[in-house]
Amino acid sequence: MLGVGIIILIVIVAILVIMAFSYYNRFVVLANRIDNSLSQINVQLKRRADLIPNLIETVKGFAKHEKEAIKAVTDARKALVSAKGVESKVKANNQLESALKTIFAIAEGYPDLKANTNFLELQRELSATEDKVAYARQFYNDSILTYNNMVEKFPGVIFAGMYGRKKKEFFQIAAVDQKLPKVSF
């Protein structure tokens, strides 16, 4: 009877050790996936920032007196490139998006600029990059969701506590960007 009890105890300990290793490895994989997805967001933001100087030069050639809007885009780009951390990147990205909207609105007043091949190509590239940024954000948030579910669900919550793993924050858009645009006729 004592031998059976020891075998059962050994099996239980072995199962717990296997679960501990398994959960540790799953936390590592998910944390790496989150880091990778954040890196992909950064890559796309950098790509967009790299397109902006060409856009500015194209706009300058047609809209010389729009210096304030051009400066706003240039300053917002510098802020995005030098931003550290998720929150400051989100803030800088929002400023850049706002400044770019101004540039594209200005382009509406310059038919030659709107028809310019370089401008149109840059506009397409920026639009494609925006789609990639949106996808990267979605992948990041999906990775956060998977990680947070593991941190909060049983038995993951026990192992998360053992390994010092805490819930992570989702990539949020600014409250200003959540408002629906007003459309009137």
Image (tube, helix red, strand yellow):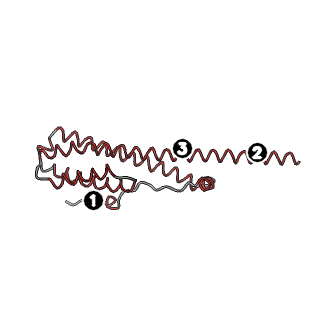
Identify the residue at image location x=21%, y=42%: 54
Q: Residues within 10 Å of mark 1 (few under 14, many from 20)?
A: few
Q: Which residue is mark 3?
A: 29
Identify the residue at image location x=24%, y=59%: 183
Front residue of this view, candidates 144 and 43: 43
User: Which type of secondary structure does the marked residue at label 1 adopt?
Assistant: loop
Front residue of this view, candidates 127 and 96: 96
Q: Amino acid at mark 1?
A: Pro
Q: Where residue 181 is drawn, which disc sits there?
A: 1
Measured in 3D between alpha carbons, the distance from the residue under mark 2 to the one under mark 1, in whole angstroms, is 61 Å
Camera-near label (3 vs 1) is 3
Q: Which residue is mark 2?
A: 11
Front residue of this view, candidates 180 and 30: 30
Identify the residue at image location x=31%, y=51%: 80
Q: Amino acid at mark 2?
A: Val
Asked if residue 166 lies left or right of residue 83, the reply is right
Camera-near label (2 vs 1) is 2
Q: Residues at badges 2 and 1 in contact (C-beta under 8 Å)?
A: no
Q: Residues at badges 3 and 1 in contact (C-beta under 8 Å)?
A: no
Residue 14 location, x and y as percent? 73, 45
Asked if residue 72 lies left or right of residue 6, the reply is left
Asked if residue 156 lies left or right of residue 62, the reply is right
Q: Residues at badges 2 and 3 in contact (C-beta under 8 Å)?
A: no
Residue 72 location, x and y as percent? 22, 54
User: Which type of secondary structure does the marked residue at label 3 adopt?
Assistant: helix
Q: Residues within 10 Å of mark 3 (few under 14, many from 20)?
A: few
The first of marks 2 and 1 along the sequence is: 2
